[in-house]
Amino acid sequence: MIFGRIKPLDAILATAEKKSLHRSLGAFQLTMLGIGAVIGTGIFVLTAEAAQKAGPGMMLSFVIAGLVCAVAALCYAEMAAMVPVSGSAYTYSYAVMGELVAWMVGWALILEYAIAAGAVSVGWSGYFIGWLQTSFNITIPLDLVRGPFDGGMINVPAMLIATAVTLLLVKGTKESATVNAVLVGVKIIALTMFILLTLPVIKTGQFTPFAPLGFGGISAAAASIFFAYVGFDAVSTAAEETKNPQRNMPIGLIGSLAVCTIFYMLVASGVIGTVGAQPVYGPGGEVLSPGTPALSQACAAIQEQAVVCSKEALAWTLKSIGWPFIGWLVGAAAIIALPSVILMMMFGQTRIFFVMSRDGLLPEMFSRVHPRFKTPHVITLLTGLFVILFAAFFPVGLLADVSNSGTLFAFAAVSIAVLVLRRTDPNRARPFRTPAVAIIAPLSIIGCVYLFFSLSAVTIQLFIGWALAGLVVYFLYSRNRSHVGRGLTEVHEPEIHDINPPVPGTH
């Protein structure tokens, strides 16, 4: 029963055949696409979180997260090339492992996209507040810029940016690739400036102790930092437009992840070597978790004079070493670039909901299109409401970790799907084949499980609670209304005219 109700792959591919894409991307273009998609919010926002969990050892955390992403990406690429239609991991799972698994993957993807959008909104808020203070000497009370878990009451700026993006998505936005390219450029220039100004003044003594909380801390930081890499699946989904995908896809995937890992390690080195990245401890020497009132109190006791206390870690570092104007520019770059990431996350969320609704697993009203704007307004508003609530009340680290739990579950499912389909349908055309699949796919599954269980106990409990709620919804509502269950397998692509999916910008 658990693997029953498989949606025929031929029915899914009927859609793809109508959309034959020109193969024009080479290895260099794929690598650049990957770098643009990956570098973003995670490095701007999560550096402080990683430092509190791992200290200078967060440099190793970037390597671990990057390696897990690399093997998962190679599995993802095979499925994306073979089933190049909407729905990503949800659709792949439906075709291979059946409706229940697909439902759980789609349910987990809600965590990935909606909560990630909340995390980016909170990250944007931190930089915006710092920028206001630096530019206009405006100080907003902590109660209005942090949620209750983080020593405040409500994060108003995060709510406002999430609301603005929701309304923009309802109205419809034709976001051009040029604008996205400029925003990616802004992010990369800002990080390059950071590296060039911090590396020459590094003090090697700041790197000891390297792992103050042991390898467990490095693993926990790697599980959080995974958020900084998600977006690489943009490369995987370009498989249908790639020249010689068997050669160029691995180069694009591994190349972009390698460049991003080096970038991230240089940024981390700049933070650690200049202002230090040792965790802040409680009054009794106890380890404090990021995004908790206890850490906020400990930071207040030292006048926030530690990078782990900052909500704008990179800007704060530059200000601390005598580059206030460049710090201001880095903050401005984050403020300008991050809303496009929120837009991409929310767009992805509405697309997943749309496909699930089209399959009958969610109410039909979710796939309603606005008569004037031609956008899925009902699900966009509902998604926006949740994102606003997440952004208002939860700290960025917790949101990023919960988002990662959904992503890791989905990637593990895709890796399993690749192995299953190689056995059950070995003769199907595969424009890209995962190299050494008997090694790569199990490594991906093990890596995803390892990072999942390196997340905090609270995050794992939240994920389990979310999964159980998903099972209840499936058996009470979705199972009886499923189109596949009722013998309907025709596939339609949604008629959404006024939105072009933005070039993925990242977590």
Image (cartoon, grey):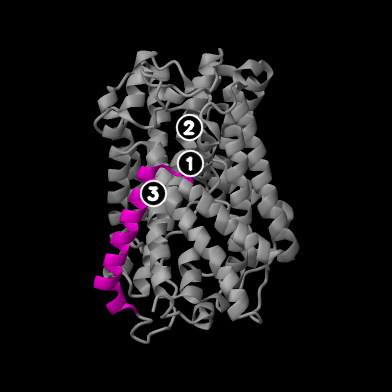
Mark 3 or 1: in front is 3
Q: Which residue is mark 3?
A: 460
Residue shown at the point (70%, 63%) measured from the top left: 24
Identify which amino acid the numbered label 2 is placed on. Answer: Lys
Mark 2 near mark 1, Cβ–Cβ under 8 Å?
Answer: yes
Quadrant hosting residue 133: top left
Q: Which residue is mark 2?
A: 53
Mark nearer the N terminus (3 vs 2): 2
Residue shown at the point (55%, 46%) measured from the top left: 229
The secondary element bearing badge 2 is classed as helix
Q: Which residues are magenta?
A: 454-482
Is residue 363 shown to the viewer in this render?
A: yes
Q: Is residue 43 left or right of residue 146?
A: right
Q: Does 45 appear in magenta?
A: no
Query: How far apart are the two marked residues, 3 and 1, measured between alpha carbons?
Result: 13 Å
Quadrant hosting residue 351: bottom left
x and y percent of residue 38 in the render? 57, 46
Q: Does 464 appear in magenta?
A: yes
Is residue 238 shown to the viewer in this render?
A: no
Q: Which residue is mark 1?
A: 224
Query: How far apart are the two marked residues, 3 and 2, measured between alpha carbons?
Result: 17 Å
Relative to 485, does residue 358 appear above or below in the rendering? Answer: above
The secondary element bearing badge 1 is classed as helix
Mark 2 or 1: in front is 2
Query: How far apart are the two marked residues, 2 and 1, measured between alpha carbons?
Result: 9 Å
x and y percent of residue 54 in the render? 52, 31
